[in-house]
Every structure is written in structure tokens, then in C-alpha cells.
Amino acid sequence: MSAASAAPPAATPSPVGHTGRIPPLPLLTLVNYFNYLDRQVVYGMTPLIGESFGLSKFQLGLLALVNLLVFAVASLASGPIADKIGPRKVIFFGILVWSIATIGSALANSFAVLLFFRALVGVGEGAYGPSANSLLCAAAPPEKRGRALGIYNVGMALGGTSGLALGAVLAPVIGWRGVFWIAGAPSILLALASAFVAAPERIPRPVSLPARAYLLAPTYLIALAGGILATFGASALIFWSRWLIIEERHFSVAAGSLFMVLVGLVCGAGGVIAGGYAGDAFNRRAGGGHARAIGLSMLLAVPVGAAALLIRVIPLFMILTALTVFLLSVYNGPSAAVVDELGPPQFAATLQAVFLFGIHVLGNAPAASVVGWVADRSTVAIALQLAVLAFALSGVLFMIVARHQRLASPARVG
């Protein structure tokens, strides 16, 4: 194993507390809520948007593809910038851009214009993501890093669910344009608040290897592949969940939206928190604990998720779907901690940025369109079995990452 294939010894986190500054965890958790609300609100309105512009399922999938491709490129560019100038300025810029672009989506008078604004949302979210992850990893002590990221990503679980429900429930009443106005406006205030978040100007650390040594390390590349597959599966499920539940399982709009909200609130947020705590607990016993928590949850989710897509008995479908969402949400708790462990703090934002770039270009961006193409020739339920296969492969890869990290770490007790 190369010297860069495992994380260096954990360094003392850089102090981020400054008098008069806003603590990063509560503020960034709220920001993450609106981050995912603004991103996924469009997914709950796809039938109405499709009717407005006469779109196929494949074209609807492009709303996700364009957003996520731009997100990935912006992530890649923002990481090294944040490592040089500090995360606070990058976070402020990102939130401001995506909030303006979400409001701009309401003004789109053609599908091309709507695609442009969804791409601009990706610019802001891509700038924000790596900086937020690296800041939270720097602020939390190593033994509590998983739970801090788990709390942060509760915002993702609740925001994504709220976006889907907001779009599905309000769009038929006030129109999809009105929903974009409601979704985007609060983030402008959060952008202003982020200018006062407690954060180091930069995290200078002497290292003996360049960033590319860590980016090309086998363990990092395996984790990246696992993240790509996990993100492909999650994006496909999120984008097509409304269609599956309301159009194919014939829930009413109200009942389907309520079910999605409850599953997101209880199972999505619960899985994220459980993943953060489980990763920390595993990590206290041996290296690779965060990756092990992800791998085990993915492998457990595979048979449950496959059964949920095949079964048409509604009560059983609901139970299996809820359990699947809980298990898959575990990934979002410790995933950023896995990446943070694979390099030194000086390159934290860069490692996060390349990881986010890879998972969104190769995993997130094509998922909705690929599954939509298969669904045009079968059903959404059948097409989503591709997501289940992706989760199975991802689970195996994260178990390999856990093994590499365990072998590279000193023996632990307790």
C-alpha cells in the first residue's frame, strides 16, 4: 500500500471559534436544508413542468443532469480555492448564487431557460459543498466527526424531503413558478448569515506529499467508485420517487406526499444520524469505521429495496420502502468523514471537491436520465432495479475501503 493510500495521523482540528461569530454546525445544517430543498423541489413538480413544455421522461431527467454536471465542475474548481482563501468566502458566494438562480427558475419562459437556471443552481451548490464539509471536519474532534456530519446531513434529508413534498403539494395550487419563489427566497438571508460563520481563514499544514498523491491513492479511488455508485442509486430513487409512488403505486397526491414527508423525516434523517454515530463507534474500535458503517448499510439495503420495488401490496411496499430509505441514508452521515480521513487537513477541501465532482458527474448527473430511458421502455419500478444493483456494488467497495483503512491504522482497544 502506498504512503498516501491511508489517512495520516489525525491532526488537532484548527480552531474555528471566534467571538461574535456564528457556530458552523447549526448554521450550515440549516443551510444544507435549503441547499437540498432548492435542488430537489423541481423533482416534485416534474409532471407539471413536463406538461408546460411538452417534455418526455428523458427530457425531464435533463433537469437533474444539467444541474449536477455543473455542480460537479463547480465543486472541482471550488475546493482548491477554499484551501487557499478559506471556506467562509466560498460558502457565502455559493449560497447567494443558488438562491438567486432558484428564484430565476420561476421566470423561465422556455425549457432552455429553465435548464440554464438549474445549471446556475449547480454553480452555487458546487461552490458551497466542499467548503462546508472541510469546515465541519476541521471544527469537530476526530472522535465526534461522524456525528457532527450526521447532524449536518439531517439538513440534507429533511431539505430533500421538503423539496419533493413542497413541489408535489403546492405546485398544483399555486403553479410550479410560485413554488420556486417560495423555495429560493430564504436562502438569500442565509447567504448574509454565512458571512459571519466562525471559520479559519485557511488551514495551513506542512505535508511531505502533493495533493495528487492522495487523490491517486488506491483507497481514495475505491472510495470514489463506491461514492459514484451510491450517488447514482440515490439520485435515481429521489428523482423518480414521486412517479413511482403516485403514478405507478396510485397513491393520491396528498397521501403520496405525506408518505414521502414522513419517510424523509423519520427514516431519512434517522438513518443519517445513525450512520454518523455508528461510524464513530466503529472507528473507536478499529480504523475504517466510517466506511464500514456505509458498506454494511448498503449491503443490508439491497434485498429490502429490491423487494420494495417488486411488491404491489401497499402496506408492505410502504414498510419496505421506509426501511430501505433508513438503511441508504446511513451513507450521508459518515461519507464526508471517510474522505477527510484519506488525506491531510491542508488538502481537505480539495479531496472533498474531487470526490463530489466524481460522484456527481459519473453518478448523480446521468442517473435520472438513464433510469428514465429504461422506464420509457418498461416501468419506473423495473428501471429502479438499476439503483439497487449500484447500491450492492457500492457496499462491497466501501467494505474494501474499511479493510484498507483498518490494516493501515494502529490497533485500537475499547
Image (tube, grey):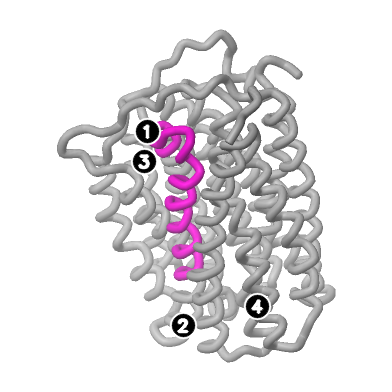
Residue topped by disc 1: 87
Q: Which residues are magenta?
A: 136-163
At label 1, which amino acid type do we have? Pro
Residue 321 lies, in percent from the top left, at: 67, 74
Task: Give the distance between the C-alpha atoms of the residues marked 4 and 3, in whole angstroms.
Answer: 33 Å
Secondary structure under the numbered disc 2 in the rendered image: helix
Q: Could you classify mark 1 by the number of other residues whose Cα lies within 10 Å: few (under 14), some (14-19), or many (20 or more)?
A: many
Mark 4 or mark 1, whichever is nearer to me:
1
Looking at marks 3 and 2 on the same chain, the residue that comes earlier in the sequence is marked by 3
Rendered-image quadrant of the C terminus: top right
Residue topped by disc 2: 169
At label 4, which amino acid type do we have? Trp
Task: Give the distance between the C-alpha atoms of the residues marked 4 and 2, in whole angstroms.
Answer: 14 Å
Residue 200 lies, in percent from the top left, at: 31, 28
Residue 140 lies, in percent from the top left, at: 40, 36
Secondary structure under the numbered disc 4 in the rendered image: helix
Q: Residue 399's quadrant in the figure?
A: top right
Residue topped by disc 3: 91
Q: Are the residues flagged by discs 2 and 1 in contact, CB closer than 8 Å?
A: no
Residue topped by disc 4: 243
Looking at marks 4 and 2 on the same chain, the residue that comes earlier in the sequence is marked by 2
Looking at marks 2 and 1 on the same chain, the residue that comes earlier in the sequence is marked by 1
Secondary structure under the numbered disc 3 in the rendered image: helix
Looking at marks 4 and 1 on the same chain, the residue that comes earlier in the sequence is marked by 1
